[in-house]
Image (spheres, rainbow, N blue to C red):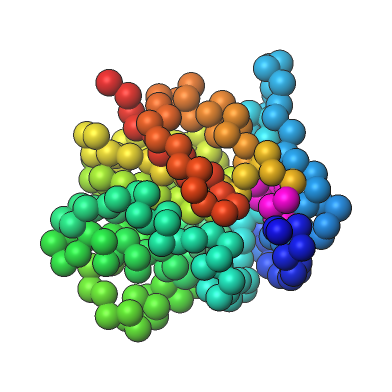
Amino acid sequence: MVRSARLVVVAVVASSAACRSAPEPVDESFVRAVPDEADAAVPDQADAPVTDDATTFEGRPIAPTMSHLGADWLGRPERITEEDPDALHAALAVRPGQTACDVGAGSGYHTIRLARAVGPKGRVIASDLQPEMLALLRDAVDAAGVRNVEPVLATATDPALPPGGCDLILLVDVYHELAAPEAMLAAFGLALARKGRLALVEFRGEDPDVPIKPEHKMTLAQVRRELEPRGFRLAQQFDGLPWQHLLVFDRGG
Ligand SMILES: C[S@@+](CC[C@H](N)C(=O)[O-])C[C@H]1O[C@@H](n2cnc3c(N)ncnc32)[C@H](O)[C@@H]1O
C-alpha cells in the first residue's frame, strides 16, 4: 500500500517562487511529504475569481524549483515502481523520426527514453533552467550512447524551443514548479507543431496516499483550469501510472 511506503525525506534546495525571473536557491524544501502532509489532498480552488501574485497561478501556490543539488532523487531506483516510466512512455507512443521536447529535463531521466523512442532520425530537445542540470544530463546522455539530444538553456519565461518544431512537449514533475506558467504556456503553444501534443505528468493531488508534498502535486481540475482557457484541449488522460496523472493536450481543431 502506498501509505506504508518508506517515507524517505529528500532534501532539495529550493528557490523562491516569488522570484520569477531569476530563481536562486534560498532555503530547503522537501519533495517527499511527511505522513501528515501526505494525508492532505490538494484542494481544488472554487470557481470564485482569484487574484494571483507572484507566488500563485489561478490560485494555486507555485512550488519552489527543485535544485540540481537534489538530482540524485531523480535517479532513485524506486522511481521505477513509483512512477513506472515504461508505462508512461508506452502511453506517450512517441514515434521514430519525431521531435520530442523534454522541458524541465533535469538530469535526463526521460530524455534518454525519448531519444531511444524517436531513434536516429528523430531528435530530443532537452530544456532546463539550471546549467548544472544540463551538465548532468549531458553526462547521462553520453553514458547512454544516444546522439540525438540537444540540451538548451531555458529561462523562467522561455523554454528555448524551436517555433512549430515540437511533435511532443513533455513535462514530468515540472509544470507545478514553473515560476511563470502563463508565459511558458504561450511559448508551448508557439513551439508545438501542427498536431503537436503537450503532455503533463503530475503527482495526483486528489490522492492523499501519494506521499509527495501538496505543492508538488496537482489535481486534474487544477490542470484543466490553467490550460483550457489558454487554448489547450485535453485530448488524452492516462490513469495507469502508480502515483501520477498523465494528461495530454492538443491545440484543438
Ligand atoms: C522535479 S525536476 C524534474 C526533472 C525531470 N523532468 C525528471 O522527471 O526527472 C524539475 C526540473 O524542472 C526544471 N525547471 C523548472 N522551471 C523550468 C523552466 N521554466 N524551464 C525549464 N526547466 C525548468 C528544474 O530546473 C528541474 O530540473
Residue 84 part of the magenta-drawn span: no
Q: In the displayed structure, would residue 56 be above or below residue 81? A: above
Q: Nearer the viewer, residue 238 or 94?
A: 238
Residue 216 part of the magenta-drawn span: yes
Q: Is residue 221 left or right of residue 51?
A: left
Specify the farthest residue to the bottom.
143
Q: Nearer the viewer, residue 253 or 28?
A: 253
Count the marks: how many? 0
**Residue at position x 37%, y 56% in the image:** 89
Specify the farthest residue to the front.
1
**Residue at position x 83%, y 57% in the image:** 35
**Residue at position x 70%, y 58% in the image:** 2
Residue 151 in sight from this viewpoint: no
Q: Is residue 169 left or right of residue 67?
A: left
State the extent of the magenta-drawn residues as a range. Answer: 209-217
* Quadrant in which the C terminus is drawn: top left
* Quadrant in which the N terminus is drawn: bottom right
Residue 87 in sight from this viewpoint: yes
Picture quadrant where residue 41 is located: top right
Q: Nearer the viewer, residue 117 or 23?
A: 117
**Residue at position x 35%, y 49% in the image:** 92
Picture quadrant where residue 206 is located: top right
Residue 252 drawn at (x, y percent): 32, 24
Picture quadrant where residue 9 is located: bottom right
Residue 44 drawn at (x, y percent): 70, 29
Residue 208 drawn at (x, y percent): 74, 46
